[in-house]
Each structure stands twice: as C-alpha cells, then as structure tokens.
Image: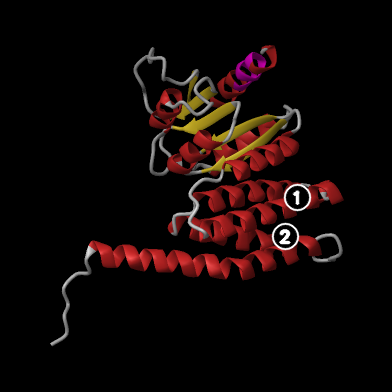
Amino acid sequence: MTNLSPKSPLDVQAMLRQLRTNFLAEMSEQLGEIESDLLALERTHRFHEVLERGYRKVHALKASAGIYGLPIISKICHQLEEHLNVLASDPERLTAELLERCVAHIDLMRTAQSAAKQGSEHFNDIEESLQELRALLLGSRFSILIVEVSKLNIKLCTDIMKGYHAHVTVIDSGYQALELLLNQKYQLLITGLEVKFLNGLALVAAVRMSARGNQDIQSILLTSSKLPPLKRNVDPNFIVARDSQFSLNLSRAIETCIGTLQAK
C-alpha cells in the first residue's frame, strides 16, 4: 500500500532547498535573455515590443525570486523595472549611460546568484550598489510612491505630479508598498485607504514605526470613508476625502507636502 502520510518538516525543507537550487541554476539563462533584450533596444525598430518583452521577463523573475526566498533578486528586478518604465514613458531617454545602468542590474543579479549558490544570506555590497544606481536614476527629483487601485485616482495623482520634478512609482498592494518603503528612500507617499492586502492607514503607521529611513515621509491618505480626527504621531500628514472637492484638496495637499520637502 502506498504511504500517503504527510511529508515531515525536514522533507519539505529539503524540497524547498532543491527548488531554490534549481531556480538559481536556471537563472543564468533568464538573465542572458533579459540582457539580450536590453542590448537590442539600441538597434531595434520594434522598440516597444522588445522593451515590453524584456519587462515581462524581469517581472516574472522578480516573482519567482520572491517565491524561492531570494528577496535581493526581487529588489534588483523591481529597480530595473523602474528604469524600464522610464524608457516606456519616454524612449528618448535611451542613452548609452542609461542602458549601461540597466545592464548593471543584470550584473548585480549575477553577483547575488553566485553568492546565494554559496549559501550567503548577506548582500550588503549589492545593496549599496543598488542604492547608487537608484540615486543616478532619480538625480535631483523627488521619489513619490502612489498606492492605489482606482485607475481614475491614479491618473489624477500622476497628472498632478507632472507639475513637479518627481519620479513616480505606482502599485496597488499595501504589502508591496511596505516592502519598498522599508528598503528604499521615498519623499512622499500617496495611498488609498482600501488597497490590496494592507490598508493605507496601517501602511502609514507601519512605516512611521519602522527604523528603516522613511519614518518622517510626507503622506496623504485618500478615502471615501468618514474617519474620526487622527492625532497620533503615526498618522498621515493629510487625509483627502473623495468628494466633490477631491481634486482641489488633493492638489493642495500635494503642493503643501512638496513645499515642505523643498524647504528642507
């Protein structure tokens, strides 16, 4: 008779380790394909098609790395996605320097892959290099994170931000936003109250209570709910109601937050 008893914790751990080992072994081919797509951008007549193909591969790699317990790979992929989003919105930004920085992310992933194969769990040098690359991308621009599920509200926020010298990242998951805010520097957070997995109020509070560099971030909460007055030191700087004055009040809140940042 076949033994259908559950696997022991040791069996499961061994299986997960093997899956991670397989993933790391297969990464080389994936990285090679992504690098080929990036290098092809300078000479292709199908720029957006090649860019989108490369972006999909990076996004898939980011998801897989998260599944197999390699957050450093996911983090590098996310930052590479930011660079590719810049190119998607403005192909004229494609320069030899920007392309070199994109390829540098591939090199960082290869370094992380090699270290992970040897059992390393510490990637401080890679983290520092990643921060340097992000600083080059941002330049003197403010880094803004928008967390929202409403396409209409996202468009409104991004349209307002066009009036400022800012780099804008848009996501719809509170958990993903928290991960970014714990690992990267942002100057302004605009979040809906009801976003995926972690609501906006909890997101702001979690960042305020962390010790990872964004405790004093300017923050704006968008909501259709009536909230009582909030006076805790972990609350958003502004709460903007989705009512008939939503657009005007949001513009004023953003203007005030940017003004505060410029005054620093």
The residue sitting at 52% across, 19% down in the picture is 216
Q: Height in image: 260 above or below 245?
A: above
The residue sitting at 52% across, 59% down in the picture is 118
Going from N to C along the chain, the mark reached first, 2 or 1, is 2
**Could you say where residue 17 lies in the image, as x and y percent from the top left?**
40, 64
Q: Which residue is mark 2?
A: 51
How far is mark 2 from mark 1, CA to CA? 8 Å
Span shown in magenta = 254-260
Q: Is residue 89 visible?
A: yes
Q: For residue 133: magenta?
A: no
Q: Height in image: 108 above or below 255?
A: below
Which label sits on residue 87?
1
**Could you say where residue 248 lies in the image, as x and y percent from the top left?**
60, 22
Dots 2, 1 in contact, CB < 8 A: yes
Amino acid type at circle 2 is Leu
Q: How is the image coloured?
A: secondary structure
Which of the pair 139/15 is nearer the observer? 15
Q: Height in image: 43 above or below 90?
A: below
Q: Please give left or right for residue 13 compared with residue 218 in the image.
A: left
Is label 2 in a helix, a strand or a loop?
Answer: helix
Query: Quadrant where the C terminus lies?
Result: top right
**Could you say where residue 227 lies in the image, as x and y percent from the top left?**
36, 21
Amino acid type at circle 1 is Leu
